[in-house]
């Protein structure tokens, strides 16, 4: 967490003041849910909360969203935006004393815009001269050893740096739904390295890796890392062992079918994830693949149909 100095208890008190009693609260995660005022009063015409608790706030990450009406009624954003709209000026003022950085500018503040390293060279654009160098050969041999094809290099704009602070790293850029760069992965291609991955500082928990390539109407594959995602079309890497709330919400709102494909040694994690997301609107839409023994995702090479996808009890 980047802001340990914030008095979260006081933030929760203001949220309760604005939205009424909470429905669920996990103070470790900083997650709390309320009845959505728009769902309750505007949509359903109730004079009390609808009891659904659809409005979920993560006050540590300062993100919030109504699972039911965010797309249609703009009920998502920052806590500042929420209090400005539904609270009193006094509540807003009290909140800003606790968290002065949260204002109309949020969330642009904490994180600088991600830029590709200036030394980044896409594999699809390597000069004839560079191809003769040992630096290029080293990088390209690594690509071949991971079974990455030239087609994948092109599709995912994969490149490398042979100098600079990302020296000796393969770069996989990520672009958001509007094709703006939002992240990249820097994986060392040296056999001996202290730091396998060196990635830019970014608000990772709100990034959908290469979202511009995702077709939400088609089955969405959930994989662990960015290197996995290049082997399966329409897959989203969690960029870690756990799914972010942001990705979960996106899936909840948009996915028609979800297929979980984690490494064979992470079967327990895969099962837990299955049961976590197979709920509510997603019930019955979640599937899982069990990879055999030493097979990993690169071995599939797009032939996922050969593997049995299944649903769990
Ligand atoms: Zn709502």
Image (cartoon, helix red, strand yellow):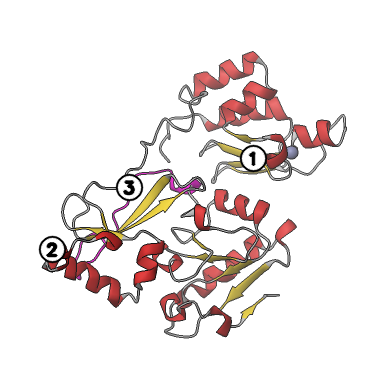
Q: Which mark is residue 200?
A: 3
Q: Write the residue at 43% across / 67% down.
A: 230
Q: Position of residue 88 (x, y in %)?
A: 67, 17
The residue tagged 1 is 65
Q: Residue 287 or 293: which is nearer the viewer?
A: 287
Total numbered badges shown on the rendered structure: 3
Residue found at x 61% / y 31%: 12
Q: Does residue 174 appear left or right of residue 30 in this picture?
A: left
151 shown above or below 86: below
Circle 2 packing at 10 Å, graded few (<14), some (14-19), many (20+), is: few
Residue 40, image x, y percentages: 81, 35
Report helix, strand or loop for mark 3: loop
Magenta-colored span: 188-206
Q: Earlier in the sequence, mark 3 or mark 1?
A: 1
Sequence-earlier tag: 2 or 3: 2
Give the CA separation, mark 3 to mark 1.
Answer: 27 Å
Q: Nearer the viewer, mark 2 or mark 3?
A: 2
The answer to if 18 sits in the magenta stretch is: no
Q: Which residue is mark 2?
A: 129
Residue displayed at 40% across by 61% down: 156
Query: What is the quadrant of residue 23 in the picture?
Result: top right
Query: What percent of the width, then of the height, locates residue 16?
Result: 68, 29
Instruction: Please identify the quarter of the rendering in which residue 239 is found.
Output: bottom left
132 relative to 72 in the view: left or right = left
The CA distance from mark 1 to mark 2 is 52 Å
Q: Judge whether 35 appears above or below 240 on screen.
A: above
Q: Is residue 183 left or right of residue 22?
A: left
State the residue lying farthest toward the front.
Answer: 128
Q: Is residue 190 visible?
A: no
Looking at the image, residue 174 lies above or below residue 233:
above
């Amino acid at each position: 967490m980047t802001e340990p100095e914030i008095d979260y208890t006081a933030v929760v008190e203001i949220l309760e003041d604005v939205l009424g009693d909470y429905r669920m609260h996990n103070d470790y995660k900083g997650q709390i849910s309320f009845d959505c005022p728009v769902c309750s009063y505007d949509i359903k015409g109730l004079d009390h909360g609808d009891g659904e608790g659809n409005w979920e706030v993560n006050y540590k990450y300062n993100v919030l969203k109504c699972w039911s009406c965010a797309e249609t009624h703009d009920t998502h954003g920052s806590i500042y935006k929420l209090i400005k709209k539904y609270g009193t000026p006094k509540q807003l003022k009290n909140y800003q004393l606790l968290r002065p950085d949260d204002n109309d500018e949020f969330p642009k503040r904490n994180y600088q815009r991600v830029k590709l390293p200036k030394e980044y060279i896409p594999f699809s654009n390597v000069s004839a001269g560079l191809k003769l160098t040992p630096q290029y050969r080293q990088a390209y041999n690594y690509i071949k050893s991971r079974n990455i094809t030239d087609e994948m290099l092109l599709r995912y704009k994969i490149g490398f740096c042979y100098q600079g602070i990302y020296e000796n790293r393969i770069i996989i850029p990520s672009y958001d739904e509007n094709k703006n760069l939002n992240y990249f992965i820097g994986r060392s291609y040296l056999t001996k390295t202290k730091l396998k991955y060196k990635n830019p500082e970014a608000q990772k928990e709100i990034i959908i890796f290469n979202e511009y390539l995702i077709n939400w109407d088609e089955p969405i594959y959930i994989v662990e890392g960015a290197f996995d995602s290049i082997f399966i079309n329409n897959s989203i890497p969690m960029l870690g062992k756990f799914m972010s709330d942001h990705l979960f919400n996106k899936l909840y709102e948009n996915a028609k079918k979800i297929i979980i494909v984690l490494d064979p040694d992470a079967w327990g994690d895969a099962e837990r994830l299955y049961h976590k997301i197979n709920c509510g609107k997603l019930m019955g839409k979640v599937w899982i693949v069990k990879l055999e023994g030493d097979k990993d995702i690169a071995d599939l090479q797009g032939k996922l149909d050969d593997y049995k996808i299944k649903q769990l009890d």
